[in-house]
Amino acid sequence: MSVLETLQATYPARYYATLDTPCAWYDMWVYSSVDGLPPVSQLFPMTSEQWAAKGGNVGTKSMAVVNGQLVDYTPPVVPVPLKTQAAAAQAWIMQQANLATAMGEVFTADMKAYVTAINAIAGGTDTTSTALPAQPTDVMTASSTAAAT
């Protein structure tokens, strides 16, 4: 029996998806041996149409086997902790501070309140907030020394 005949006898559907979420793909008849391949009992047989719909050998479409059906897979949204969001917001604040310094301007009262709130969340002293405050629309105002010249 040839290698192809062995593969065809072991994997009659040719195309398979694993039962992982998301699944991996196998075109079983291209292998040179059955060694190291998962048992057919742990795979979902696919039709040629399903194989083509996922993009064939080069397709990278994320899918999963759910209730015996091959369906598109959308990964769950991973929530970003508020403290991490605040740390990222501090980078934007630093950009604004650098711009203000370069232009001889100062932060508005709204921006100062925003900086205080973000620093409290990032530093862990504010443990009750559930969302970041909105970025102020007015960030800078001319400093009194810049306005006097």
Image (spheres, grey):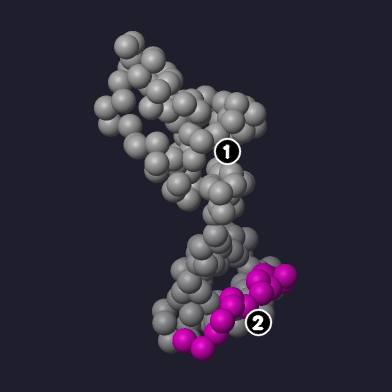
Where is mark 1, residue-wise? 61
Task: Indicate left or right for 144 with 21 as reference.
Answer: right
Q: Quick one: label 1, few (<14), some, or many (20+) residues within 10 Å?
A: some
The quarter of the image holding the C terminus is bottom right
Specify whether residue 41 is painted magenta.
Answer: no
Residue at position x 57%, y 26% in the image: 56
Where is mark 2, residue-wise? 109
Residue at position x 42%, y 28% in the image: 11
Task: Indicate left or right for 125 with 105 as reference.
Answer: left
- Residue 142 coordinates in the image, percent (x, y): 69, 71
- Between the C-alphas of marks 1 and 2, the distance is 49 Å
- Relative to 67, is 114 above or below? below
Q: Is mark 1 on a helix, strand or loop?
A: loop
The answer to whether residue 101 shows anywhere in this view is no
50 or 136, which is in the foreground? 50
First-in-chain label (1 vs 2) = 1
